[in-house]
Amino acid sequence: MERRLFSAEHEAFRETVRTFLAKEVTPHYEQWEKDGIVAREAWLAAGRQGLLGLAVPEEYGGGGDPDFRYSAVLAEEFTRAGAAGLAVGLHNDIIGPYLTSLGTDEQKRRWLPGFCDGSLITAIAMTEPGAGSDLQGIRTTAEDKGDHWLLNGSKTFISNGILADLVIVVAKTTPEGGAHGLSLLVVERGAEGFERGRNLDKIGQKAQDTAELFFHDVRVPKENLLGEPNGAFIHLMTNLAQERMGIAVAAIAAAEHLLEITTAYVKEREAFGRKLAKLQHIRFEIAEMATECAVTRAFLDRCIEDHAAGTLDAVHASMAKWWATELQKRVADRCLQLHGGYGYMTEYRVAKAFTDGRVQTIYGGTTEIMKEIIGRSLLS
């Protein structure tokens, strides 16, 4: 079905993204996967191309256009290129809104120009060894010392953890407040007592630096508090819908791309003297995946349109996230199976997509959490 979501400007932007990926990312990606980290030059190149800070006001060096459809184009094209390591979606769509909506004028002047030109790479640190989706389990603390906060604790599974120059840390500032006693503190590279642990060895997304972070008596200036004291829970909930939409957009794009690859493969591959595409079972598999992708695409495009208009609610964002990521997981598994032994070889795109995409049902809120949000909204 013809998509009606994007204008000529969006499609022109898509060509810009594809050109950038072909020139600045794809030729280097294999080396980045071996290194376990993306070269900083790639971030600077993305900044020069205008791919960072799309929604940041022009006065700070950004694109000045909050239209989420541009972010959707970025997510789709990076996914098709298999370039999850260069986490521009995390930077633009997850961390960007915290800085633009919660930052003071001084904070915006200090941080946003580097955010947009790629010289200041960002991360957000929520997850801890003993706390993931449950924010009440966070143990990292920040004690008010008058002219600064004293930060102690640890975080894990932090994307951009090694590269990040700016880390938004979720910390407990009122111990008896539970989830409503948390604040957002911005820790900058070089802060005394701020240490990075291992660049974690994952089964997929090898080029994405995912790290442990440690904070030992880190003195965080009072002017680095982001948003309201003890307001982190509300701030986090406000921005989660966009994070989940970004993940969902990448998920359906991945499923569609895998279907394209596999459809081409079964047309050429022979077994028992016949093309795989001539076998009824194979045709049924392709038909089922194509239908599932088409139905999901229709819902996702409606969600993208609503989010761009500012009308998407948390429940529908949760529906999009869990359905699209679970579809991606199913399609990746079925497409790998249809590739046979070749599907298990890392040189084949389907193998890398299988491992790279597996985390999609976990981060940004697990499938189980998404179902809980949806169910609670219907039954409370």
Image: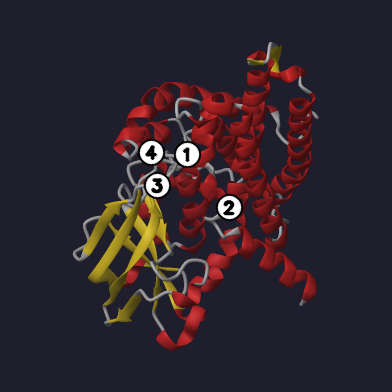
* Picture quadrant where residue 377 is located: bottom right
- Which residue is labeled 1 in the image? 84
Q: Amino acid at mark 3?
A: Lys
**Labelled pair 2, 4 in contact (Cβ < 8 Å):** no
Q: Specify the label residue 361 is tagged with.
A: 2
Q: Amino acid at mark 1?
A: Ala
Q: Earlier in the sequence, mark 4 or mark 1?
A: 1
- Which residue is labeled 3 in the image? 202
Measure the C-alpha gap from mark 2 to mark 1.
15 Å
Q: Residue at x 27, y 82 (%)?
A: 145
> Is 122 situated above or below 76?
below
Q: Earlier in the sequence, mark 2 or mark 4?
A: 4
105 or 17, which is in the foreground? 17
Which of pointers 2 and 1 indicates the residue nearer the eye?
A: 2
Where disc 2 sits, the SS reads helix
- Which residue is labeled 4 in the image? 207
Measure the C-alpha gap from mark 2 to mark 4.
19 Å
Q: Amino acid at mark 2?
A: Thr
